[in-house]
Image (cartoon, rainbow, N blue to C red):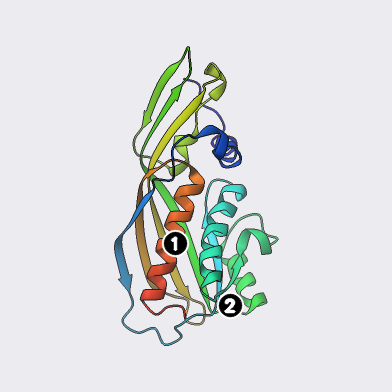
Amino acid sequence: MVQADSARILLLLLAGMAAACTTQPSARTTVDRVLLARDIPNAPYSSIVLVGIAPTRELAREFEQGLSDELSRRGVEVHSFVKESSADEATADAVAALVESVGADAILMISGRLAGAEIDEHSAMVDVEARAIGGNLFNFFRYDYEEFTEPSYTDMTVDVTLVALLFDAAGNERVHSVEVSTTQGSTAYEVIMSQSAAIASRMEQDDLID
């Protein structure tokens, strides 16, 4: 097996999910851990800067877009760092500058890691299986698909853990953290959307957003 650019492979999966995967959406997401500050005087928050932590801006954008859609449906004004900041990296100064410019009252940072993954490639001539356990979330997508013989279909499942940390912009304090895990996700898109819905629902349940 030859390693390939993880970002390129993930973007190919996102673009070709309908053609590449024959299974129906099967991702199952659960909330594993929640920490809530005793005193959150500025909640509920109505304007949030969303910061996705990922190896590339493209991958960070996918994280941010999924959660932005879910929060926007709940009436929250969301500002994506990747889309609205001119900075190349999400440094503390760059995030603070965006918060000040848009007048946001909270910052939500999200990052993920791979808990487990499995891929099965099938064709008339090829039946390849590869497994990766542990490590960075996007290590799973580091496979060179050119070594396969035009598979007729592909089965992919991943188990992913995502952590979302909410900071009060005025007090610069972390007020909430939630960890969610997804099993049997067949595409990166499916995993991101399933986890985004779980995080937004939990924030609503904890009265952090209206």
**Residue 185 horizontal/vertical position (percent):** 41, 44
Pick whichever, 92 or 80, lies toward us: 80
Q: Is residue 168 left or right of residue 31?
A: right
Label 1 element class: helix
Image mark for residue 32: none
- Quadrant for residue 32, please give it: bottom left
Q: Nearer the viewer, mark 1 or mark 2?
A: 1
Number of callouts in the render?
A: 2
Image point (54%, 75%), residue name: 76
Q: Is residue 64 left or right of residue 111?
A: right
- The residue type indicated by label 1 comes to Ala
**Residue 91 horizontal/vertical position (percent):** 57, 61
- The residue type indicated by label 2 comes to Ala
**Residue 164 horizontal/vertical position (percent):** 42, 62
Image point (43%, 34%), residue name: 156
Label 2 element class: loop
Q: Is residue 156 left or right of residue 49?
A: left
Vertical placement of residue 203 versus 113, above or below: below
Pick whichever, 64 or 189, lies toward us: 189
Residue position for label 1: 197
Residue position for label 2: 104
Pick whichever, 195 or 163, lies toward us: 195
Q: Earlier in the sequence, mark 1 or mark 2?
A: 2
Image point (56%, 39%), residue name: 18
- Determine whether label 1 and label 2 are within 8 Å by CB: no
